[in-house]
Image (cartoon, rainbow, N blue to C red):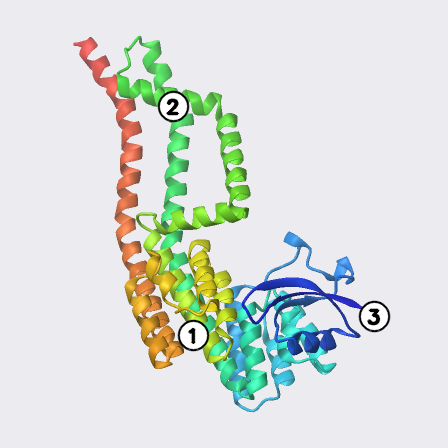
């Protein structure tokens, strides 16, 4: 009998991995559901390596293409189109080859008797845990059309917020790269040419010029040490980031950065609120909700607080106690959650929180772009101006000697 590997969240909100023997993947899915387990991933470990995704060789489905798929599927299914037929239509219209390939497999699995959520769970790189759980809840309640609409709205808002943050960061990154390239070019090609002329004339170089010349000589003579240092530092950061402690420390530091820290913080809170609201409306148990949102919030520091909250809820205490103690959750978030707990409308409150923070991210991203542009122009002016001034200073000494 075939053996399938699974990753699930149990009724107490704990992630578990293991194997299960079953005649086929559909029966394995049903057996896990019968144990009150929410399936994160279910796959056949004996599957040929050639049919699996092979790291960087496998193409990824872009977020905008996936978001478009969700909206198109929700619209067609709500209009009365059969679910399998709707997926087939979207697959034909999609310009994404990876998405087409995944949808083709899902169509075949559904025609063989598998549910949409079970088929989607076998492709966790495309359909995440939140998507699978919400579709599964829609299938179980008979409100799949409504759940598809909620899923598409959630991913659209999440994608819009993420793009806003990305657009706020692209300009400064491009400008910093441009400034670095200009400075390096001047240090390697411009400064040595002028200094050779001044030294040939016996001009005594002032301190600022000597400092610039020393930096220029270092870049020319030891650039390979600099590159090696950058590579080693990058590898150390990547290795450290993969550890639990490193991921927590780096994500906590990101939230404390002076300019982008608040933007990343608000984005993480918006994502947590939107996901929490969506899963709560899908009637997912609270412990499982807290486990899932701790993984999808996009920040390990916030995730750790949410895991502590899960343990607090499991012990029979309030949802807000660990959130009140943490400086990572603003007072407004705690108050809204508290009000939602008291009135039984926590999904509505979390939805309003998500709307507020998503709007706040939009406004802050636009303000940052308007603020950073002149600051970077000033930075480029200072960097280039300092080098030019260092080159010009010996000319004044030369003119003084000529008098």
**Residue that numbered label 2 is attached to:** 215
**Residue that numbered label 3 is attached to:** 1
x and y percent of residue 323 in the render?
36, 62
As helix, strand or loop, the secondary structure at mark 1 comes to helix
Q: Nearer the viewer, residue 219 or 333?
A: 333
Q: Residues within 10 Å of mark 3 (few under 14, many from 20)?
A: few
77 shown above or below 353: below
Cα–Cα span, label 2 and label 3: 68 Å
Circle nearer the N terminus (3, 1): 3
391 shown above or below 44: above
Residue 265 appearing in the image: yes
Q: Residues within 10 Å of mark 2 (few under 14, many from 20)?
A: some
Q: Nearer the viewer, residue 166 or 354?
A: 354
Cα–Cα span, label 3 and label 1: 40 Å
As helix, strand or loop, the secondary structure at mark 3 comes to loop
> Which label belongs to residue 277?
1
From the image, which quarter does the N terminus lie in? Answer: bottom right
> Which label belongs to residue 296?
none
As helix, strand or loop, the secondary structure at mark 2 comes to helix
């Amino acid at each position: 009998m075939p053996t399938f590997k699974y990753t699930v969240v149990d009724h107490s909100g704990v992630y578990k991995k293991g194997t299960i023997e079953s005649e086929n993947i559909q029966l394995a899915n049903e057996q896990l559901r019968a144990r009150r387990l929410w399936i994160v991933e279910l796959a056949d470990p004996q599957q040929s390596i050639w049919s699996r995704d092979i790291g960087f060789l496998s193409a990824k489905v872009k977020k905008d293409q996936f978001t478009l798929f969700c909206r198109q599927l929700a619209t067609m299914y709500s209009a009365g189109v059969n679910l399998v037929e709707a997926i087939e239509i979207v697959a034909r219209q999609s310009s994404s080859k990876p998405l087409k390939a995944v949808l083709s497999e899902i169509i075949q699995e559904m025609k063989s008797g598998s549910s949409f959520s079970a088929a989607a769970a076998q492709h966790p790189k495309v359909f995440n845990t939140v998507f699978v759980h919400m579709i599964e809840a829609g299938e179980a309640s008979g409100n799949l059309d409504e759940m598809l609409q909620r899923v598409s709205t959630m991913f659209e808002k999440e994608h819009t917020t993420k793009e806003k943050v990305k657009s706020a960061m692209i300009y400064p990154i491009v400008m910093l790269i441009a400034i670095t390239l200009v400075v390096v070019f001047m240090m390697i090609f411009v400064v040595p040419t002028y200094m050779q002329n001044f030294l040939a004339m016996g001009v005594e170089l002032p301190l600022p010029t000597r400092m610039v010349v020393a930096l220029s000589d270092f870049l020319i003579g030891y650039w390979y040490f600099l590159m090696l240092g950058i590579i080693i530092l990058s590898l150390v950061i990547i290795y450290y980031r993969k550890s639990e402690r490193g991921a927590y420390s780096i994500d906590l530091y990101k939230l404390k950065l002076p300019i982008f820290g608040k933007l990343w913080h608000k984005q993480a809170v918006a994502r947590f609120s939107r996901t929490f609201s969506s899963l709560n409306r899908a009637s997912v148990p609270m412990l499982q909700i807290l486990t899932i949102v701790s993984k999808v919030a996009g920040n390990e520091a916030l995730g750790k607080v949410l895991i502590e909250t899960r343990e607090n809820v499991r012990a029979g205490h309030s949802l807000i106690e660990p959130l009140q103690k943490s400086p990572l959750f603003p007072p407004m978030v705690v108050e809204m959650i508290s009000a939602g707990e008291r009135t039984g409308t926590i999904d509505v409150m979390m939805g309003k929180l998500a709307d507020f923070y998503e709007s706040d991210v939009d406004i802050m991203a636009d303000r940052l772009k308007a603020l950073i542009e002149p600051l970077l122009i000033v930075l480029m002016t200072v960097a280039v101006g300092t080098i030019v001034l260092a080159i010009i200073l010996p000319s004044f000494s030369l003119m003084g000697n000529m008098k």
